[in-house]
Amino acid sequence: MKMLHVSVWRGGAGGEYRSYEVPRQESQSVLDVVTYIQRNIDPTLSYRFACRVGMCGACAMTVNGVARWTCRTHVAKVVKDDAIQIAPLANFPVVKDLVTDMREFFDKWARARGQFVPCATRRDAFAQVAADSPGRVAANAGIECIGCGVCYASCDVVSWNPDYLGPAALNRAWTLVNDVRDGARRERLAAVAGDAGCHACHTHLSCSERCPKDITPTASIAGLKRAVAVAALKGEL
Amino acid sequence: MSSAGHGYAGAPLAGPNPGARSETWLWIAQRASAALLGLCVLVHLVTIIYAVRHGLSGEAILARTRGNGVALAFYMLYVLAIAVHAPIGLRTLCHEWLGWRSASLNWFIAALALALFAFGLRAGWAVFLAPV
Ligand code: SF4
Ligand code: SF4
Ligand code: FES
């Protein structure tokens, strides 16, 4: 049987790589490989997943140095000389093995005011949002985010500036800025401005290159920069 | 801006973001000065190429700039754009590369902007008043 040489990060921040031999199978995903190790070689291996079909965003890891969603990454796509290296996501504190602590990542969504703030009451009619209205189109471009953290792990600015809200939180804020039903536009624009917010983005595009959902957080962040500048010029910041 | 947030349970609320306004204005200044610089650099390059192509001597160039209000106004604008643009960019570099984020950085950057402007003014003024 053809074997795959897999090197997996074990332990916390001060851990090390350990090697495992995993039978190679057709249409095998990287998540399949990790699962095989845990079920057949070492049950103490910790990792995270839920849906296995690219919906939940739980399974992201660093595969051969690149952040990816592992449930939908075929081994065939990433394997080099029958070997792959699997590590926890960069820019996240490691809890154990392949599990990272995502609290700061999601706290930043809250800091970027990533919560929808309704402004209608039960007595108001439903908002009618035309599918081709500019706001709806802009929101659509970013709305399919699954919160996997791949973009955040791929962003150099996050690694330089730990306060930086990061591409996912800012993308989320941008979808809400374009939501006509939302009532916190002003506060949100103030929350995402500055050198921990949209102005820190260097337009490197790593986030957009790596996002498994083909979202372009870079464009969302550019949109925020424009919206924030307009708000400042109008004296609304 | 209200600091009462709509946070999820346990999540830190979005507090006031004191740098929001100043950072945004710096960004606007940076972008506006960049647009101006694009134009100024172009005019400046064309001027240099013209001078070189026509083999103008230093004296011949000064003869054209001496008392030339248009040239003086143009270079003042150019100097202003540089004095705004360069320090803001350097400030970001200091943030990211040196981790220098204290108030002293802003003083340093303001001093740099003033110095750039003063030296530029002096140079522009010198060719405007160039002695015969
Ligand atoms: S485009 Fe901006 S957010 Fe995306 S990776 Fe680059 S710096 Fe980070
Ligand atoms: S923007 Fe893309 S990469 Fe970033 S968290 Fe959302 S789905 Fe993942
Ligand atoms: S397991 Fe849900 S996205 Fe991969």
Image (spheres, coloured by chain):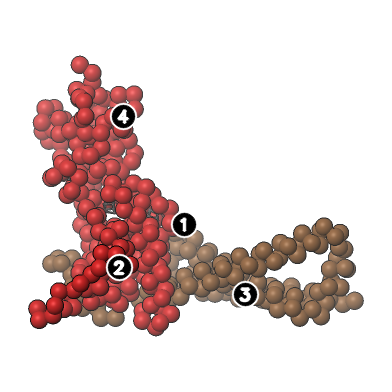
Kind of residue at badge 4: Val
Foreground pick, B120 / B78? B78
Query: On residue A80, which mark appears?
Result: none
Q: Secondary structure at mark 4?
A: loop
Give the colour in which the image draws chain A: red
Residue topped by disc 2: A133
**Dot 2 and dot 3 residues touching (CB under 8 Å):** no
Q: At which x and y percent is residue A34?
A: 18, 34
Kind of residue at badge 3: Leu
Q: Is residue A231 above or below residue A86?
A: below
Nearest-to-viewer mark from 2 and 4: 2
Q: Quadrant of residue A74?
A: top left
**Dot 2 and dot 4 residues touching (CB under 8 Å):** no
Nearest-to-viewer mark from 1 and 3: 3
Give the colour in which the image draws chain B: brown
Foreground pick, B68 / A41? B68
Chain of the residue where label 1 is placed in the rendered structure:
B
Q: Earlier in the sequence, mark 1 or mark 3?
A: 3
Mark-to-mark CA distance, 2 and 3 = 41 Å
Residue in view at x 23 percent, y 34 percent = A30
Same chain assignment for discs 1 and 4: no
Query: Is B126 positioned to the left or the right of A29 in the image?
Result: right
Same chain assignment for discs 3 and 4: no
Same chain assignment for discs 2 and 4: yes
Q: Quadrant of residue A179?
A: bottom left
Query: On residue B80, which mark appears?
Result: 3
Residue in view at x 25 percent, y 81 percent = B2
